Image: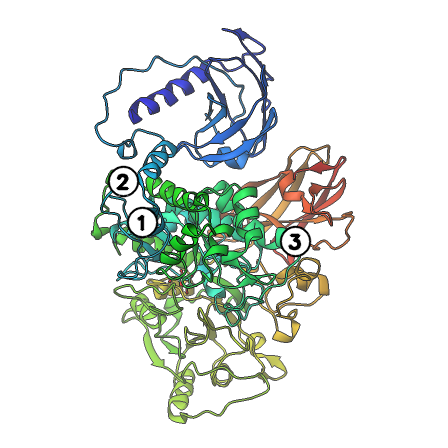
Amino acid sequence: MKALNLAKVFICIFISVLFLNIKGKEHKGINTKFKEGKTQHTLNLKKDVDIFCSISIVNESSILKLVGEEKIFASLIDNAGRKIKQFNSKEILISGEDLLSGKYFLAVNNEKPIKITVIDHFILCDGAFVEEEEEEEEEEFEGPAYKNPDLPIEERVNDLLSRMTLQEKIDQLSGDPKLDGFTTKYNDNLEIPQIKCVDCPHGVRWGNATFFPVPIAFGSTWDVDLVEEAAGVIGRECRAKGRNMGLAPCINLIRDPRGGRVFETYSEDSYMLSQMALAYVNGLQSQKVIATPKHYICNNSEDVRWNEAAVQIDERTLREVYLPIFRRPIVTGQAWSIMGAYNGVNGEYCCYNEWILREILKEELGFEGFVVSDWGACHSTISSIKAGLDLEMPRTNYYGEALLQAVEDGDVAVVYIDEAVRRILRAKFWAGLFDGIEPVDESVVESPEHISVALELAKKSIVLLKNEGSVLPLDEHSIDSIGVIGPNANTDFRGQGGSSAVTSSYAVNVLDGIINKVGDSIEVMYAEGCEIGTEHAPSYIPEITDSVKFQQALDVAEKSDVVILVVGLSGAIESEGNDRAYLIFPGVQEQLIKEVISRNSNAILVLKNGSPLTTVLEIDTMSLFEACPAILEAWYPGQEGGTAVADVIFGDYNPGGKLPLTFPKSASDLPTWDFDYTNDYTEGRGYRYFDKQGIEPLFPFGHGLSYTEFEYSNLQIIPMVSLNRQITVRVDVTNVGDMEGDEVVQLYIYDVERSTDDQPIKELKGFSRITLAPAERQTVEFKLTPEHLAFHDEQINFLVEPGRFDVMVGSSSRDIRLEGFFYITEEIRIR
Ligand code: BGC
C-alpha cells in the first residue's frame, strides 16, 4: 500500500510536469486557471471528483483558491494524516515554509481530497491535475485496525481509543513510577508501546554517547544545515539506545548572560533561535525520534525556575519575542512534543496555564503533538488536564488515581482524557512504535562518522574574538616551545551542566589537542596555575592560595616562546538549576591572566565557557582583554574539542564562528534582570538593548574574525518599492585574503516608520554561512517575506505597516558593511 502511494506520488509528479503551462483549460468538468509562473491556483471543485494539484514554490506564500458549489472547509494535512491547518475560507494561503518542509500535503474539502505535491523547491511552475488512478485490490489485513500500518494515523488512533478503558487511557498520561523516570507505562492488553525519553541537547544522556560541543556552540556556527546533521546523529544514537523521544532542543531565550542554561541554548535573538530550533527538530525527527522543544515558555532564569510568579509579561512582548521561537519548530517543523516549563507566566504555572497551552499552542498554532511537563512541573490534576497538559513526567503524581477520581466525580469530562491520549498515540504511531520500527545498531554510538560531525561542529563553532598583529595562526616551524597554562587546559565538561550532561568514552582536551598536533617537534610545557575557583563580586579581589602552583605557571610562561592560556568556567559555576551571580572570572584566574601576559607577549587566550566573561584587572590602564593579543572563544567544545582548538591555533582550520550573544564589558551595562518582562519588547534584550542605549559591548552579537578578509559589494534590493511582495536582498562577498575561509553574512532590518515608535534599531532577519577560496566571490541572497517584516501593534494585530525599511548587511551587528532601503506601500495584515 505504501509503495502504491509512493508510486502515485511519482505518477502525479510526472503527470504534473506534463501539464506545466496549462492555462484555463477544461478537463473533465474541472476548471483550472493557472497563471503562468505565478503561485496562484484556482480549482473548481465538483462533487465526486478527486483532484490532484501540483504546485511548487520559491520561499514565499502561495494562494490556492477553491471555487466550489458548496461551502468549503479545507484542511492541510501531512503525509502522516496529521492536520496542519484548517481554513474556513475559499482562499488558502500556504506558506512557502510549510511546503518547503518537504512534506506532501492534502487539502480536504470535507471528504474530497486534493493532493498538493511540491514538485520543485526552486522553480515556479503552473499547477495541474489528474484523475486518480484505479486502486489495485488490496489484501485484507488481519487483526485490529490500529495495528494495520497501512491505515492513516488518525484512523488507527480512533480504533485504538475505542478499545481502551478509562483506566487504560489514564495510564497513558504519566510516567511509570516503577521504571527509570524517563519511561511511560506499557499496556499489555492492547500492546501499546511506551514512550522512552532521553535528554539530548548536545548528545544522548544515556550511557556513553557522541559528545558534541554545548548548544551555545551550535549557535555560534550559524550553520543550520550542520545543526540538522548533528541532530540527525543524535537521533540515530537515541534509536540505538532504544529511546524514542528526545528532550531537546532547549530553546530558552538568553534574556541575561548570567542565566545558568545559557550554555544549553543557542542565542539571544529569537529569529536565530527559531531557525536553530527548526533545524534541530528536522534532524532529530528525520530519525523518527520525537523532538521536544523546551521549555515552553519564558524559562529564562534558573534561580527562579520553580517560581509561579517568575514572569510577568504583556501579550505583545510574548508574541514578539518569546513565542516566535516556538512557532517555527511547531508549525513548520511539526515537532511531536513540547515541554511545559517549570516557571509560571502571569501568575499561573506553565503546566496549567490555559492561555499558554490550550489557546495559543493548541488552538492558535495548531499543535497536534502532546505537551509533556518538565520533570516535576505538573502542579495540579484538574486544571492541568483542562489547560492541555497531556503527559505528566517523570511519574504519576497528580494524574493517575487522582485523575481517574476527577473523571468519576464529574470534575473532568472524558473528552479531555481522550484528547490527551489521542495526542500521545498519534506521536507513537508516527514514530513507528506499533509497527516494529527497525532497531539501529549500537555500533553507531561514538562511531568515527558520528565523532567527525562533532569535530566539524567544534571547528565551526570557534570564534576568533581578537587577533592583533595576526599572532594567529601559529607557525609550527618558528616555535621551539609552547606553554599550555590554565585551569581549563585539561578539562572537558563531560557529565556536567545538569540534565544535558553527556558522557563520551573519551574527550580530547586542549592540552591533549596541542600535544597531538605538534608531536615531538615542539616542546610542550604544562602548568595548571590555579583552580577554576568560585564566583565572587567584581569589587573583591581574591587571594592566591596556592602560590606554588601559581608560580609554576609563571615560570612556564617565561620559558615558552608562545603561551596558550586556557581559562573560563565549569559546570560548577554555570548549570541547570544555577544562575551565575556575576560575569567576571571566578577565583584567581584574572590574576593568572595578568601575570602570564605580562611575562609573555605571545599569549593566546582560549576561553572555555558557556556564557560571557568580564574582567576588572588592568595592565597599564588596559583591560585584560585589551592587553591580550589573541583571544579564541572555544566554548565547551565536546569530545574532539582539543583537536578543533589545535587546528585553529595552527591554521589547519580557519575560524569562522560568530557570537550568538553579546559580550558586555560589565554586568552593569545590562538591563535589569527581574520578573517584569513587560519592558522586554520596547527596551530590548541583548544587542537590541545595547543598540538602543548606545552602549559599546566588549564583543558584539554576530562578531567573529577570520584569518582572511571579506569584502562586501553590490547590494541589491529588489523591488525597492513594493505593494506586498517578497523583497529579495542580494550582496556579493569576496574573499580578499590568501586563505580559504568562512564568513557569516548577516542581514538586519530597521522598520523606520513604525507607528508604535518602539521598534528595535536593528533586527536579525537572515544569515548565511559561506566558504570562499582566496579571490572567490559569491552572491548571497536573502528573501524577506511579510512575516519577516511584520510586528504586533498595540491591538496585537500582526501586520506590516507601509513605510521605509532600512536594510543592513554585514559581518556582525556592529560591523555593517552595506546599507540600503525599500518601501512597502500598503499595509499587509497577516494575523
Ligand atoms: C530539565 C529538563 C529535562 C528534565 C529531564 C529537568 O530538570 O529542566 O530540561 O529534560 O529535567 O531530565
**Who's the residue at 31% across and 22% down the image?**
4
Q: Earlier in the sequence, mark 1 or mark 2?
A: 1
Residue pointed to by mark 3: 315
Front-most of residues 64 and 148: 148
Question: Mark 2 packing: few (<14 Cα in 10 Å), some, or many (20+)?
Answer: some
Q: Earlier in the sequence, mark 1 or mark 3?
A: 1
Q: Is residue 229 visible?
A: no
From the top left corner, tell me how far across and down residue 693 is, in percent.
Answer: 72, 65
The tag on residue 636 is none
Q: What residue type is labelled 2?
A: Phe
Q: Assign the C terminus to one quadrant of the image.
A: top right
Residue pointed to by mark 1: 244
Q: Can residue 322 be seen in this view?
A: yes
Badge 2 element: helix
Of the two numbered discs 1 and 3 in the rendering, the one whose residue sits closer to the viewer? 3
The tag on residue 434 is 2
From the top left corner, tell me how far across and down residue 246 is, in percent.
Answer: 36, 53
Question: Mark 1 packing: few (<14 Cα in 10 Å), some, or many (20+)?
Answer: many
Q: In this view, does 212 lie above or below 40?
A: below
Badge 3 element: helix
Mark 3–mark 2 Cα distance, whole angstroms, equals 41 Å
Question: Could you tell me if the residues under marks 1 and 2 are in contact, i.e. CB atoms within 8 Å?
Answer: no
